[in-house]
Every structure is written in C-alpha cells, then in structure tokens.
Image (cartoon, rainbow, N blue to C red):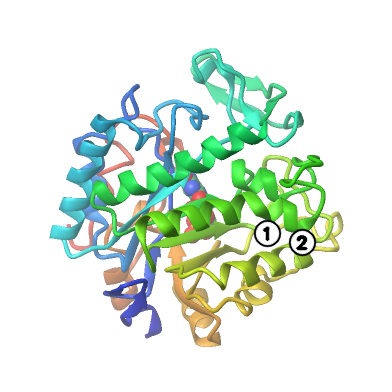
C-alpha cells in the first residue's frame, strides 16, 4: 500500500506517506506557550510520516484567536523544544505551520488592536470567536509597505525560531483566508501598489515570504499550504487557474520541501471558474512533492497516490481521533470518531484520550 511506503520529503525519508494535517486545538496558555498535554498529543501521533503542527502565531500582531500558540518569545520556543524532542524520540518528523491571521481576528483577542490586512475590507456574513462570545468582524487596517516588510521579517524570524525549537521544517499557512491568502485574492486585496492589482502583484507577498524563509533556513525545509478553491473567510478569485498556475511556476524556482494543496469543496454554481480538482490542476504543475488534503480516507488516499500527482496525503480529523492512524490503515482497523465539541479549546478530554488500537 503506497500510503504505508516511505517517501522522501525535503532532506528526510519519512516512515510512511501519511501526514497529520495542521490543526488548531487552542490549548496553549494565555501567553501562547504549549504545555505537557501538547507534548503528549503530538508524541502520540509520532507514527505519522510527517506531523504538521497546529498553526503557530509568528508575532503578537499575528494572533487572531485565544489560546493559540506562538513562536516569537523565548518561553514559546523553549516549550516547542520539548514537543519536537519528544516527537523525534518517537521516530517522527514535525514541521511548524507559520500563521498570521490578518483580518481573521478581533480586537478583543488582540489587546485592543484592530486586525491588519491588505485592504480595509471586513469579512461579512461570518462571526469570530472571542472570549466574549461570537462577534462581527471589524474593518481591518490596511498595511503600508513598511509594515508589510516587517511582517515578512516576522515570518523569517519565526522560521528561524522554529528551526531553533527543533522543527524539521516550516509550512507557510497560505490557505483558508489567513493573511497570505488575503493577499492572493481579489476579494480581500484591492491594493494598487506592488502587492495588488494583478495576479503577479497579488502573489508577491507569498513569494517574498517563501524567498526570505528559504534564505534563512536553507533548502528543502520550507513548504507552503494553499487552498485555491476555498471560499471560507470571504475569499474569492476571479481567475484562480491563472493566478495559482503562475504561483506554482514561481514556487518551482525555490528549493521547497513540498507543496500542500487542499481540495476544498465549493459551490460549483456560484464559482464556475474554479477547478473541480485543485490537486490535479495545480499539483500537476509542481516540481516539488505534492501533499494532498481534504476528505481523504484510506481508500481515497491510496487512490490519490496511485494516480501519481500527490506523493503524500494529509489527514486532519482522522489523525485527531486516531493517534495510531498508520497502524489502523495497515490492519484496516476500526476508526475512532472525532468529537467536534472538544476540537477547539478545553482540557485533555478529546485531546490526549483517544484510544489506541487494543487499548
Ligand atoms: C480542529 C481543526 C483545526 C484546524 N486547524 C487548522 C490549522 O491550524 N491550519 C490549517 O491549515 N488547517 C487547519 N484545519 C484544516 C485541516 O488541516 C484539514 O485541512 C481539514 O481537517 C480537512 O482534512 P480532513 O478531511 O482530513 O479532516 C483544521 C481542521 C480542524 C478539524
């Protein structure tokens, strides 16, 4: 079974072709520092070929939601060191997902500061979780060039911090409507400077970050996650195939570890310009190993690998609920079902108590 075969990603030969997809669990303390339960949570899942961490805030400004971890203070870096050491001791490989939420936040979780974004366009028709309950989105402050350059440096520093914390590499979270995705999409980027106005300019922020990160941490350790068909967080593209094809061509020129493509379902009637299979349309263009995500199970994952475009499949909710997922796939064993009520926030229930097979 291809899913259980070793695959080379970056400089490492992974023990199988199954990755644990990045999942925010909102269990850090108020200072964004992870604790002993987080060490156990990731260590329990060390049989994944690759673990991608939950999204990690690159700076104070990056924070969008309560109890999400950071990697910009020494205490945060030291706490991640314990996680990466323990995952390595368990035979695993772990990348850090780097996160800036941009306009997907609220001043109530940002010490009173308004969110920032490419343009002053608020998310409509959705609300945001805060300590004071669900709130409408605020209009973000548009970033000036100096502030954009500072954020690119924050990504670079966070990548350096992640390597210092023992991660094997980093994945830029450029999916799901967070800051890099806000730059990519016309619906959130109406700039007229070098960061907006054309597909090339809208791609620039992502490419600048990737270039800086690669320069800082070296070849084959930087990766990127894209969701070209996601409409979550008010993201929409007029010409997604042209835009993301161009992005893939530019990414091909950088020495990346992998490109993570999400095949997110979308309302086809509303977005006829969207490709029905983002892995097929964009994965084909990549010279880097392609990681495919969204809605895969054992059979669909294997079929995707057999097709030959993707080299590795990432599993989210299945890994959340099944710490020994590769073993269960090997034995075609029964699967624990994920508990939605304990996905975000809370204590150890629904975090580190999902049973292993034969336990
Ligand atoms: C609880 C939860 C938290 C998530 N947090 C993140 C995140 O921090 N970063 C990210 O890129 N995707 C995040 N996702 C999306 C998952 O990585 C994945 O794309 C999604 O679960 C679909 O994959 P699946 O069908 O295998 O579950 C999250 C999903 C869940 C269920």
Q: Position of residue 85 (x, y in %)?
A: 16, 52
Task: Specify whether residue 198 is in view.
Answer: yes
The part of the image, by quadrant, that contains residue 272 is: bottom right
Q: Which is nearer the N-term, disc 1 or disc 2?
A: 1
> What is the CA distance from the residue labelled 1 to the residue labelled 2?
7 Å
Q: Is residue 170 above or below residue 144?
A: below
Residue named by callout 2: 240
Give the quarter of the figure containing the C terminus: bottom left
Residue sitting at x 32%, y 82%: 5
Residue named by callout 1: 228
The reply, left or right, for residue 47 in relation to residue 147 is left
Identity of the residue furthest to the left in this view: 89
Residue sitting at x 74%, y 49%: 185
Q: Which mark is residue 196?
A: none
Q: Is residue 260 above or below residue 129?
A: below
Q: Is residue 23 above or below residue 68?
A: below
Secondary structure category for the residue under label 2:
helix
Residue sitting at x 63%, y 78%: 285
Give the quarter of the figure containing the N terminus: bottom left
The reply, left or right, for residue 200 in relation to residue 41 is right
Report whether the residue tagged 1 is closer than 8 Å to ligand 1.
no
Q: Position of residue 109 (x, y in %)?
A: 50, 20
Crowdedness near tag 1: few (<14), some (14–19) or many (≥20) residues, C-alpha within 10 Å: many
Residue sitting at x 26%, y 41%: 38
The part of the image, by quadrant, that contains residue 269 is: bottom right
Between residue 219 and residue 34, name the one nearer to us: 219
Asked if labels 2 and 1 touch by Cβ distance under 8 angstroms, the answer is yes
Secondary structure category for the residue under label 1:
loop
The reply, left or right, for residue 280 in relation to residue 198 is left
The part of the image, by quadrant, that contains residue 238 is: bottom right
Task: Specify whether residue 21 is in view.
Answer: no
């Amino acid at each position: 079974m291809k899913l259980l075969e070793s695959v080379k990603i970056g400089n490492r030969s992974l023990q199988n072709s199954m990755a644990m997809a990045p999942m925010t669990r909102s269990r850090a303390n108020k200072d964004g520092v992870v604790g002993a339960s987080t060490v156990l949570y990731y260590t329990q899942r060390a049989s994944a070929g690759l673990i991608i961490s939950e999204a990690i805030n690159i700076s104070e400004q990056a924070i969008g939601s309560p109890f999400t971890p950071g990697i910009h203070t020494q205490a945060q870096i030291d706490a991640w060191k314990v996680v990466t050491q323990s995952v390595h001791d368990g035979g695993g490989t772990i990348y850090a997902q780097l996160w800036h939420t941009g306009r997907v936040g609220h001043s109530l979780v940002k010490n009173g500061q308004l969110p920032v974004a490419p343009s002053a366009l608020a998310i409509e028709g959705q609300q945001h979780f805060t300590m004071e309950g669900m709130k409408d989105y605020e209009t973000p402050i548009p970033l000036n060039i100096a502030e954009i350059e500072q954020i690119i440096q924050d990504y670079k520093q966070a990548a350096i911090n992640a390597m210092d914390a023992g991660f094997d590499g980093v994945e830029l979270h450029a999916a799901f409507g967070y800051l890099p995705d806000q730059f990519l999409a016309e619906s959130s980027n109406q700039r007229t400077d070098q960061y907006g106005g054309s597909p090339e300019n809208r791609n620039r922020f992502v490419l600048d970050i990737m270039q800086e990160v690669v320069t800082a941490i070296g070849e084959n350790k930087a990766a990127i996650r894209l969701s070209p068909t996601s409409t979550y967080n008010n993201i929409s593209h007029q010409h997604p195939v042209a835009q993301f094809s161009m992005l893939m061509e530019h990414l091909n020129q950088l020495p990346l570890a992998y490109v993570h493509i999400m095949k997110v379902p979308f309302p086809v009637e509303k977005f006829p310009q969207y490709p029905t299979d983002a892995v097929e349309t964009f994965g084909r263009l990549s010279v880097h190993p392609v990681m495919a995500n969204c809605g895969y199970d054992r059979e669909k994952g294997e079929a995707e690998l057999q097709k030959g475009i993707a080299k590795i499949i990432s599993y989210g909710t299945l890994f959340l609920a099944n710490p020994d997922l590769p073993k269960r796939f090997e034995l075609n064993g029964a699967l624990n079902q994920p508990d939605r009520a304990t996905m975000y926030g809370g204590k150890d229930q629904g975090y580190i108590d999902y049973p292993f097979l034969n336990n």
